[in-house]
Image (cartoon, rainbow, N blue to C red):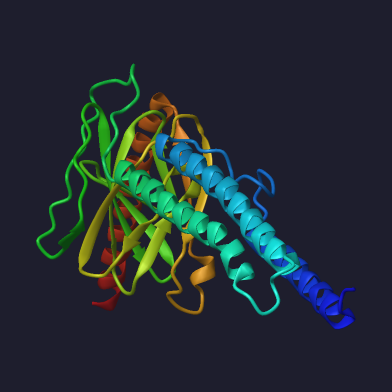
C-alpha cells in the first residue's frame, strides 16, 4: 500500500514542476514583433536571413531541450525508487547531457553566423560597376574591428553615434544625413561605426547583426538590402536618459533613385552652406 505522505509529496513536486515548465516556456517565447510572436521580421539581406535561420534553429532546439528536461525530471519524481535513492538523479542524467550538447551546438552555430557576418559580401549581380567603396582614413580613430572590403560595387559610410542621434557621412561624396541612412538596393554598404561621446550600438535587425560605436575607435561592418523598403533600427546600449529615442532608419532605394537622392542632397547642403555664409556675413556687417 502506498504511503499517503509520499503520494502527496509526489503530487506537490509534479505541480511545482509543471508550473515551473509553463513559466519557463512563457519566458522563452520571443517578444512580439511585427511579423508575429514566433518569428522575427523577415530578413532583407543575406546576414538577416542567416540570423533568422539561426533564431529558428535555436528556438526549436531550445523547446526540445526544455521538454526533454521536464520529462526526465517528472519521470524521476514518479519513479518508485525516487524516495531515498539515486534513481531520480540517474533518470535525469540523459536530459542534462542532452542539454549540454544542445548548448554546445548553439554556440558553434552562433560562431559560424557571426563569422559570416564579419566578411563583406559582394554586391548583387547586375549592379553597375561605377560604385566603389571609399575607405575611412582618420588617424584619430583606432581600428577596433575590421572586415575585408567587398569585391565589386560598394559604397562606404561613416556612422557616428552621439547623444542621441546617428549621423551618416557618405565617403567619397559631399553628403551627410541624420537619422535616415539611404542606400542603393543590392549594393554592399561598408559601415565605419564610431561615437563622439559615449558607447552606442547600431542595429537594424532585418539587415544584420549590431555594431558597437565606441569613442576613439572605428568598428567596421556591412549591410546589404536586397529589396527596396524602410528598415527600422535603434541603439541597443543604455547611453543616457534619452537612449530609447536614439532610433534610425535605413531607406533602400533603386540605384537610379539613390543617385537622384545623392544629387539632390548635395545641392541642398550647398544651398544651406551658402545661406549660412550670407547670414554670417550680414551679421558681421551689422556688428561693424
Q: Looking at the rendering, which quadrant does residue 142 occupy?
A: bottom left
Query: Do we see residue 27 in this rendering?
Result: yes
- Residue at (34% x, 71% y) in the render: 199
Badge count:
0
Q: Quadrant of the C terminus?
A: bottom left
The N terminus - image quarter: bottom right
92 horizontally vs 116: left or right: right
Quarter-of-image position of residue 259: top left
Residue lying furthest bottom in this view?
5
Residue shown at the point (34%, 50%) measured from the top left = 111
Residue at the top extreme? 126
Image position, residue 286 (x, y; %): 30, 73
Front-most of residues 7 and 121: 7
**Residue 179, can we see it?**
no
User: Residue 38, position in %: x, y?
Assistant: 66, 47
* Residue at left offset 76%, top offset 74%: 13
In this rendering, is residue 85 above or below 190? Answer: below
Please tell me which residue lies in front, 251 or 225: 225
Q: Residue at x 25, y 57 (%)?
A: 219
Residue 176 in the image: state x and y as whole percent.
Answer: 33, 50
Q: Position of residue 179 (x, y in %)?
A: 45, 55
Amino acid at each position: 500500500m502506498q504511503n499517503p505522505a509520499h503520494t502527496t509529496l509526489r503530487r506537490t513536486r509534479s505541480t511545482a514542476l509543471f508550473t515551473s515548465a509553463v513559466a519557463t516556456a512563457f519566458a522563452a517565447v520571443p517578444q512580439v514583433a511585427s511579423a508575429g510572436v514566433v518569428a522575427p521580421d523577415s530578413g532583407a539581406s543575406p546576414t538577416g536571413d542567416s540570423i533568422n535561420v539561426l533564431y529558428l534553429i535555436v528556438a526549436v532546439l531550445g523547446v526540445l531541450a526544455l521538454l526533454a528536461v521536464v520529462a526526465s525530471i517528472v519521470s524521476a519524481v514518479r519513479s518508485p525508487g525516487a524516495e531515498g535513492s539515486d534513481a531520480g538523479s540517474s533518470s535525469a542524467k540523459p536530459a542534462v547531457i542532452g542539454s549540454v550538447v544542445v548548448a554546445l551546438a548553439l554556440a558553434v552555430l552562433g560562431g559560424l553566423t557571426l563569422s559570416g557576418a564579419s566578411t563583406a559580401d559582394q554586391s548583387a549581380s547586375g549592379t553597375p560597376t561605377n560604385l566603389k567603396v571609399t575607405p575611412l582614413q582618420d588617424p584619430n580613430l583606432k581600428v577596433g574591428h575590421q572586415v575585408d572590403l567587398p569585391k565589386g560595387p560598394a559604397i562606404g559610410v561613416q556612422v557616428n553615434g552621439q547623444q542621441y542621434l546617428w549621423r551618416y557621412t557618405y565617403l567619397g561624396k559631399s553628403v551627410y544625413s541624420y537619422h535616415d541612412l539611404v542606400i542603393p538596393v543590392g549594393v554592399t554598404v561598408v559601415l565605419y561605426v564610431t561615437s563622439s561621446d559615449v558607447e552606442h550600438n547600431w542595429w537594424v535587425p532585418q539587415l544584420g547583426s549590431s555594431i558597437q560605436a565606441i569613442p576613439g575607435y572605428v568598428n567596421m561592418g556591412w549591410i546589404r538590402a536586397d529589396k527596396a523598403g524602410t528598415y527600422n533600427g535603434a541603439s541597443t546600449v543604455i547611453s543616457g536618459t534619452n537612449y530609447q529615442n536614439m532610433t534610425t532608419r535605413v531607406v533602400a532605394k533603386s540605384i537610379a533613385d539613390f543617385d537622384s537622392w545623392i544629387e539632390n542632397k548635395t545641392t541642398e547642403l550647398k544651398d544651406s552652406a551658402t545661406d549660412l555664409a550670407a547670414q554670417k556675413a550680414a551679421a558681421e556687417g551689422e556688428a561693424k
